[in-house]
Amino acid sequence: MMQLDGSFHAWLEERGPVLCLMNRVDAARGETLSELHEQETTWAAANQYLRQEYLPDHHRRFRWEAAEPENYHRKAPGKRELDAIFRLREERTISNDWVVRYQGCFLQIERQSAPRGHRGSIRRESVGAALPYS
């Protein structure tokens, strides 16, 4: 697991402005990557100090090897799975002419797909399409 955190502080004391220490930790290995930033601007000298002096010492003292070399993270879900997770459903009644009203629109459905008067649902996909289904 990767952890990322930013902390604004007077890291350079009176020698410079308040900076944000952006710290990323690989929790499986205890490895840290840190950089000092002022907003989106990188401070080259401070970052050079972190890379060349602070982080090697930090890793020497606190880093460990992962218990197992295998990566057990799940594969990122695809678009189809994300659409299924992030879709919204609302119930509607199918009118006599097989029309469903949704957000001020009339959605015509196929006559054979559901009986008139039937309660069906509208699903709203992440891309914004509204599709009737029962």
Image: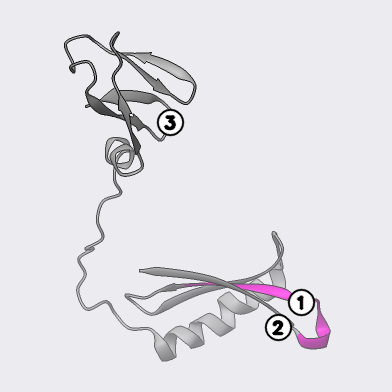
> Residue at 28% of width from left, 13% of height from top?
109
Q: Is residue 41 left or right of residue 69?
A: right
Horizontal arrangement in the rendering, residue 61 relative to residue 37 (left or right): left
Task: In the rendered view, tell whether residue 92 sits above or below residue 34.
Answer: above
Name the spot of residue 19 as percent of width and height, x first: 72, 74
Q: What number of labels is visible?
A: 3
Placement of 81 over or under 114, stated as above or below = below
Q: Which mark is residue 127?
A: 3
The residue that appears at 27% across and 40% down in the rendered structure is 81
Residue 18 lies in the magenta-colored region? yes
| Residue nearest the viewer, comparing 7 with 85 | 85
Q: Secondary structure at mark 3?
A: loop
Type of the residue with mark 1? Val
Please state which amino acid type lies under the numbered disc 3: Val
Residue 11 disc label: 2
Q: Secondary structure at mark 1?
A: loop
Q: Which residue is mark 1?
A: 18
Please name the residue shown 42% across and 15% down the image: 106
Write the start and end of the magenta stretch as one range: 13-24
